[in-house]
Each structure stands twice: as structure tokens, then as C-alpha cells.
Amino acid sequence: MVARKAKSKTKHQRAGLVMPVSLHAKRMRLAKVAKQIGDKATVYSTAIGDYIFMTVMKKCIEHMDTENEGKPTKRARLMASDLHHAIRNDRDLNEAFRAVGMSSARDLPNALDKILTGDDLKERQEKKRQARKTKKEKLALANTSAGMD
């Protein structure tokens, strides 16, 4: 009888992780983190990423459940607002992600003010002022014409 070869396990399976260790190692090499990167270093850094990921997902699911008055939610997808809320409401995660900008529909208009510099910023602020002025004029005109009827 021929002995069967045991099925090989990947690094992340051996370490008990969800994220692939080899992909993380490749990214570290491409980013040129160091001249040489050991196997244990890639497994360890992947484990850290895996732990943070699992923590954020757990907080997102808790947020979705509290949003649904404590009952398990029937939603199958996470939204950006769930992630944002979960990270910003947890003290440790907020500390870890404080330098990370998370955009959502309501945050986008003000994000450019922090990115733009010099003339571009002044031009944007002037356009905002003009838009507000035009909006106020239209409102005033609508109020006076409504009062005439």
C-alpha cells in the first residue's frame, strides 16, 4: 500500500490566523521595511493585524446590534458608518486610528480644506462664500415675493 502524502498547511493555517502570512510578508518586502525579514516577524505582524481586524469587526457587529435595540441584526453587510462608529466609540481603537482619516458622505466637503494649501484653499473658500451669498439672496428674494402675494 502506498503511503499518502499529508496535505500541506499554509503559514497562516499553522499559526491559526485568518489573514495570509505570505501576502503580508510580500507587502513588507515591497515596502522595504528592512533588508531582511524573518518568518517569525511576518507571522507576528500578521497576528497583530488579524487581532485588530477581529476587534474592529466585533465592535461593528455590536454597533449593528445596539442600533437594532439589542436584537441580532438581519443586515448582511457592514457600512462605512458602522466602521466609523465602532472605531471612534472605542477608546483603544480610537487611539490607534486617530491619524487615519475615514471619509463618509458628510465628511468629504471639509476634507479638502485640510489638504489644499495656498491659492487653491483661498479659491475654494471664496467659492464657498459666493455660494452662501447667492443662496441667501435667493432666499431673500423668495421671501419677499411670497410676502407680496
Image (tube, rainbow, N blue to C red):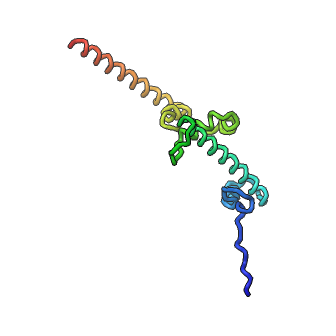
Residue 116 position (above or below residue 35): above
Q: Residue at x 56, y 42 (%)?
A: 72
Residue 102: percent from left, percent from top: 57, 39
Residue 2: percent from left, percent from top: 73, 86
Q: Residue at x 55, y 39 (%)?
A: 71
- Left or right of 135, for residue 77: right
Residue at the far bottom: name it.
Answer: 1
- Left or right of 124, for residue 139: left
Residue at the far left: name it.
Answer: 149
Residue 127: percent from left, percent from top: 42, 28
**Among the 4 quarters of the image, the one containing residue 22:** bottom right
Residue 107: percent from left, percent from top: 51, 34
Residue 147 position (above or below residue 29): above
Q: Nearer the viewer, residue 113 or 123?
A: 113
Residue at the far top: name it.
Answer: 148
Q: Residue at x 68, y 46 (%)?
A: 52
Numbered circles on residues, count: 0
Q: Nearer the viewer, residue 70 or 60?
A: 70
Residue 56 position (above or below residue 124): below
**Among the 4 quarters of the image, the one containing residue 25:** bottom right
Quadrant in the picture for the N terminus: bottom right
Q: Nearer the viewer, residue 46 or 73?
A: 73
Quadrant in the picture for the C terminus: top left
Q: Residue at x 61, y 38 (%)?
A: 86
